Image: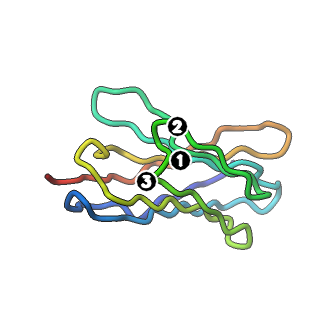
């Protein structure tokens, strides 16, 4: 079982920035892909971006530009930098991890981001 703990959310004014972190505890198996998703109230969870352990990134088309995903394999941690925050970015942000062999996704409990106008 992979345990994921997100942090870095909070209340921020529009135009501000946040850096979210997600630390994974998994020592037995290699974590291949890590990803960030978000879910706004009343909406489906949507992919923001993913990153492999080799650093290959993939962004949802609607998320390109203000979101940057990065990863520190030595810490089993993935980051999400969000710039120029907008009120519509208000959502719970979730981290997901996929192990080698395709196992997953494993989910964290999320961190809340609230953007005030």
> In the rendering, at what x and y percent does residue 87 appear?
22, 47
- At 79% from the left and 58% from the top, the residue drawn is 54
> Callout 2: few (<14), some (14-19), or many (20+) C-alpha neighbours within 10 Å?
many
Contact between marks 1 and 2 (CB within 8 A): the answer is yes
- At 48% from the left and 46% from the top, the residue drawn is 94
- At 83% from the left and 45% from the top, the residue drawn is 100
Earlier-in-chain disc, 1 versus 2: 1
Residue at numbered disc 1: 36
Q: Quadrant of residue 79?
A: bottom right
> Callout 3: few (<14), some (14-19), or many (20+) C-alpha neighbours within 10 Å?
few
Using the numbered discs, state the Cα–Cα distance from disc 2 to disc 3 in whole angstroms: 14 Å
Left/right of residue 68 with respect to residue 54 in the rendered view? left
Numbered circle sitting on residue 67: none
Residue at numbered disc 3: 66
- At 43% from the left and 41% from the top, the residue drawn is 38
Q: Which circle, 1 or 3, is nearer the viewer?
A: 3
Left/right of residue 18 with respect to residue 79 in the rendered view? left
How is the structure coloured here?
rainbow
Give the farthest residue toward the right: 101
Residue at numbered disc 2: 47
Using the numbered discs, state the Cα–Cα distance from disc 1 to disc 2 in whole angstroms: 6 Å
Q: Secondary structure at mark 1?
A: strand
> In the rendering, at what x and y percent does residue 59 appear?
58, 43
Earlier-in-chain disc, 1 versus 3: 1
């Amino acid at each position: 079982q992979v345990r994921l703990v997100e942090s870095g959310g909070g209340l921020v004014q529009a135009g501000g920035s946040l850096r979210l972190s997600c630390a994974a505890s998994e020592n037995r198996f290699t974590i291949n892909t890590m990803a960030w998703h978000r879910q706004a109230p009343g909406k489906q969870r949507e992919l923001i971006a993913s990153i492999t352990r080799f650093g290959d990134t993939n962004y949802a088309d609607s998320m390109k530009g203000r979101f940057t995903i990065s990863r520190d394999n030595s810490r089993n941690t993935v980051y999400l930098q969000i710039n120029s925050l907008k009120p519509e970015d208000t959502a719970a942000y979730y981290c997901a991890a996929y192990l080698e062999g395709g196992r997953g996704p494993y989910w964290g409990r999320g961190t809340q981001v609230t953007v005030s106008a």
